[in-house]
C-alpha cells in the first residue's frame, strides 16, 4: 500500500527543478504536523562532533517562509525538558550559490553538507560541500552517470576518517523523482571515493537513511510503495541486503544505539520505530513511539535524535 503524500509536497514527476527534487528527497512535513510556532525556523538536519564549533550539537535551519536562507545554529538542552531545546542565533554559512542543502555530518575540523546544485530551472545535480575554517568548497562526489537529475541525501561518518553518502535521483535530467539510489564512500576524509548502486526500480522513492555502528554501516532505502530495504556492512565486510520490511512508510532517520539500530518512519502520518540488530535482522517490536512530527538523526552523537513538531524541538536518546 502506498504511503500518503506529506502535506503540501508531492513526489510526482510533473515537478521539476532542484526545489522539487529536494521535496522528493526530504519528503517534507508529515500530514499530522501542527502549525509552526512563530519565529521557529525549519529544521533541515543535525550533526555533532565538529571541532570547528567545539563538538557541540548543530542544526541546519531554513526560513519557514522561503524554505531557503539557510543557517547553522547551536542547539542546547534547557533545564525544563518539556519546553524543548533552545536554538542559538544563526551562524555564518557561506554556501555556494544555487546549492540546496539536505543533511550534514562532521569529521574533525570539517563539516560535510549534502544536497543538490541547481544547474537549470528544471535540472539538479547531487552535490557535497565541505566547510572548513569558514570556507566552503565542493567535494569530488562520484555522481554516477545513471543519475542525471538528483540529490545527495543521507550522510554518516564511519570511523575517524570515513564517510558514507547516499546519492539518489533518476536518469532523466528533467524529472524530479527518486527511482534509484547509489552509495559513495571515502575512507580518507574525502581524498578518494568509491561508488556502487544500492537500489533501482524504486518508483517514486522516499529516500535513504544511513548510520554507522561499530565501524560498520546500516542503510534503509524507502521505495515508492512504502517498503524498506535494509542493507548492512561490517567494518571489514561488504555491503549486503539483510531484510525487507513491507508497508514500513517513509524512512526519516536511522539511529545507532549500543545494542540496536532504530529506524524512525512516517507511516500514514504516524511516527513508528523499528529496531534491528547491527547486522540488519529485525528485532521484537520496539516500545510504542510517542514521537510527533519529524525525526532527525544526529550523526556524530550515537543514540541521539531530534524530534520536532514545528513548535518545539526535543533532544531524545535511546533507552
Image (cartoon, rainbow, N blue to C red):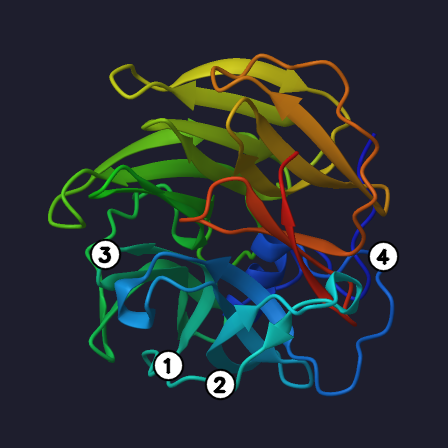
Q: Quadrant of the C terminus?
A: top right
Q: Is residue 216 left or right of residue 276?
A: left
Mark seen at residue 31: 4
- Which residue position holds label 2? 90
Is the residue 86 above or below the residue 191 in the image? below
Label 2 and label 3: CA atoms lie apart by: 21 Å
Mark seen at residue 108: 3
Q: Which element is circle 2 on?
A: loop
Q: Are marks 2 and 1 in contact (CB under 8 Å)?
A: yes
Residue 131 pos. (x, y %) = 26, 70
Is the residue 94 above or below the residue 168 in the image? below
Q: Is residue 245 left or right of residue 268?
A: left
In this figure, what is the number of numbered marks? 4
- Which residue position holds label 1? 93
Mark yes or no: residue 226 visible. Answer: no
Badge 4: how crowded within 10 Å, few (<14), some, or many (20+)?
some
Mark yes or no: residue 273 visible. Answer: yes
Q: Which element is circle 1 on?
A: loop
Mark seen at residue 140: none
Label 4 and label 2: CA atoms lie apart by: 28 Å
Amino acid at each position: 500500500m502506498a504511503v500518503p503524500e506529506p502535506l503540501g509536497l508531492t513526489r510526482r514527476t510533473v515537478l521539476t527543478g532542484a526545489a522539487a527534487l529536494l521535496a522528493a528527497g526530504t519528503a517534507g512535513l508529515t500530514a499530522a504536523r501542527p502549525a509552526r510556532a512563530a519565529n521557529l525556523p525549519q529544521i533541515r538536519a543535525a550533526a555533532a562532533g565538529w571541532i570547528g564549533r567545539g563538538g557541540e550539537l548543530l542544526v541546519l535551519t531554513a526560513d519557514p517562509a522561503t524554505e531557503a536562507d539557510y543557517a547553522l545554529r547551536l542547539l542546547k538542552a534547557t533545564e525544563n525538558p518539556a519546553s524543548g531545546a533552545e536554538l542559538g542565533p544563526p551562524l555564518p554559512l557561506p554556501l555556494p550559490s544555487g546549492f540546496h542543502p539536505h543533511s550534514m555530518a562532521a569529521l574533525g575540523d570539517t563539516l560535510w553538507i549534502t544536497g543538490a546544485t541547481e544547474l537549470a530551472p528544471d535540472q539538479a545535480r547531487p552535490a557535497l560541500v565541505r566547510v572548513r575554517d569558514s570556507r566552503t568548497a565542493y567535494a569530488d562526489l562520484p555522481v554516477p552517470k545513471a543519475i542525471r537529475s538528483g540529490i545527495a541525501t543521507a550522510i554518516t561518518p564511519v570511523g575517524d576518517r570515513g564517510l558514507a553518502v547516499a546519492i539518489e535521483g533518476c536518469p532523466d535530467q528533467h524529472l524530479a523523482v527518486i527511482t534509484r539510489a547509489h552509495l559513495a564512500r571515502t575512507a580518507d576524509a574525502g581524498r578518494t571515493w568509491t561508488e556502487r548502486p544500492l537500489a533501482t526500480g524504486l518508483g517514486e522513492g522516499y529516500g535513504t537513511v544511513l548510520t554507522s555502528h561499530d565501524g560498520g554501516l546500516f542503510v534503509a532505502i524507502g521505495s515508492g510503495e512504502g517498503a524498506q530495504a535494509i542493507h548492512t556492512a561490517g567494518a571489514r565486510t561488504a555491503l549486503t541486503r539483510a531484510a525487507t520490511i513491507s508497508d514500513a512508510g517513509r524512512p526519516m532517520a536511522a539511529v545507532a544505539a549500543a545494542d540496536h539500530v532504530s529506524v524512525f518512519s512516517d507511516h500514514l502520518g504516524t511516527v513508528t520505530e523499528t529496531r534491528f540488530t547491527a547486522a540488519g535482522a529485525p528485532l521484537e517490536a520496539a516500545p510504542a513511539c510517542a514521537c510527533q512530527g519529524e525525526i532527525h538523526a544526529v550523526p556524530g552523537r550515537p543514540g541521539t535524535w531530534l524530534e520536532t513538531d514545528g513548535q518545539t524541538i526535543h533532544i531524545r536518546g535511546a533507552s
